[in-house]
Image: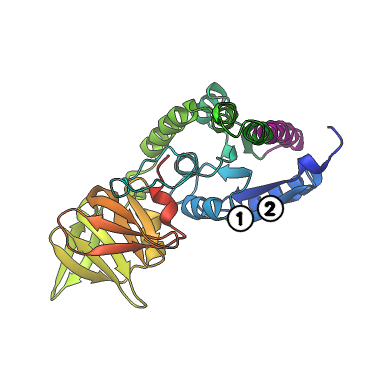
């Protein structure tokens, strides 16, 4: 391994639902890459996407199998593969940050490993060997160095030719394409395969709610949104409203992450019922629903779901 230098500094996010595995990986990374700063840890895919947007790490070590949003779905959200409803017509689209380098961590499964190798996607198989992790670290250092050179080239080109942005645009385009766009095709295939292999009971199909003296079975597909307060969560569906005792966190673990997203610490929305999203001040937004007068607030911690890539 080459001697470390200033260019070896980087930041990383570790995502795994098992705390011991997160600690184990962080320990080995500290030995192999002392300049790497672990800026956050997440227990599931949704936490990972939120932290990635907040911290903008250079690297994400991402477990494949996690409750709720799995690692493949989280990676698609981080790299722009999940497309959500557009903002108000004519509004300026938000600028996406640089996509992170992703290293998947998975138990050995032939279909996943073959897909990763086909897409030239970096991965570690549990329990990972130090030598294999060292290879990944070397590749990550090389890719990040290439990214820094591309960024420097773009800056130099812009400074040298202020009247023309063509050289800077070419360098920036090369930087943006560093994780190939074919990546999402591989991830989409893997996500579908993971959903096929997961048990049918893994996703919520019905919401049981008390309506007067009755217990109502509400099809999850008909739910527009959930909004909670300190004691109860309001369920709004096409047939009415009801209160349940499930928390937002409990609901997230059972809902399809490609259909239901958290837009506020106290709210989840079904994307099928979203008509448009209007940008607000201070990196906030308002969700407008199809055929409904009310709007839902999107906090700045969750507005990244509606970025246009």
Q: From the viewer's side, name the closer residue of 131 and 280.
A: 280
Q: Tag 2: Cα neighbours inside 10 Å, few (<14), some, or many (≥20)?
A: some
Q: Which mark is residue 41?
A: 1
- Horizontal side of residue 1 vs 290, given as left or right: right
Q: Residue furthest bottom?
A: 231
Residue 284 locus on image (x, y percent)? 40, 60
Farthest-out residue, top? 118
Q: Quadrant of the C terminus?
A: top left
- Residue at horizontal 13 percent and vertical 76 percent from the top: 212
Image coords of residue 214 (percent x, y): 13, 71
Q: How far apart are the two marked residues, 1 and 2, measured between alpha carbons? A: 8 Å
Q: Which residues are magenta?
A: 128-150
The residue at the point 33 percent across, 70 percent down is 228
Q: Nearer the viewer, residue 250 or 199?
A: 250
Residue 272 vs residue 284, the one in the foreground: 284
Is 139 inside the magenta-drawn segment?
yes
| Image quadrant assignment for residue 209 | bottom left
Q: Is residue 37 left or right of residue 241?
A: right
Measuring from the top left, give residue 291's x and y in whole percent: 14, 55
Magenta-span inclusion, residue 79: no
Pick out the residue farthest to the front.
163
Q: Are marks 1 and 2 in contact (CB under 8 Å)?
A: yes
């Amino acid at each position: 391994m080459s001697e470390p230098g200033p260019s070896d500094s980087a930041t990383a996010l570790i995502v795994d639902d098992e705390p011991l595995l997160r600690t184990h990986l962080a320990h080995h990374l500290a030995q192999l890459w002392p300049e790497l700063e672990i800026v956050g840890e997440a227990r599931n895919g949704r936490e990972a996407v939120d932290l990635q947007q907040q911290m903008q790490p250079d690297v994400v070590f991402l477990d494949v199998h996690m409750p709720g949003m799995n690692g493949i779905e989280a990676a698609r959200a981080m790299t722009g593969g999940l497309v959500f409803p557009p903002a108000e017509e004519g509004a300026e689209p938000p600028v996406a940050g640089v996509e992170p380098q992703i290293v998947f961590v998975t138990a050995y499964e032939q279909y996943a490993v073959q897909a990763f190798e086909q897409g030239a996607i970096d991965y570690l198989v549990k329990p990972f060997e130090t030598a294999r992790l060292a290879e990944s670290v070397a590749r990550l250092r090389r890719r990040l160095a290439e990214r820094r050179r591309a960024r420097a080239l773009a800056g130099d080109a812009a400074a040298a030719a202020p009247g023309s942005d063509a050289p800077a645009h070419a360098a920036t385009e090369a930087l943006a394409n560093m994780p190939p766009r074919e990546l999402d095709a591989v991830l989409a295939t893997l996500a579908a395969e993971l959903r096929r292999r997961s048990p049918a009971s893994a996703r919520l199909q019905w919401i049981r709610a008390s309506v007067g003296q009755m217990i109502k079975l509400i099809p999850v597909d008909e739910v527009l949104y959930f909004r909670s307060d300190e004691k109860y969560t309001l369920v709004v569906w096409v047939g009415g409203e009801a209160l349940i005792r499930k928390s937002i966190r409990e609901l997230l673990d059972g809902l399809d992450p490609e259909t239901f997203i958290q837009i506020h610490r106290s709210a989840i929305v079904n994307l099928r019922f979203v008509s448009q999203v209007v940008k607000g001040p201070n990196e906030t937004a308002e969700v407008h629903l199809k055929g409904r007068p009310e709007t839902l607030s999107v906090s700045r911690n969750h507005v990244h779901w509606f970025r246009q890539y």
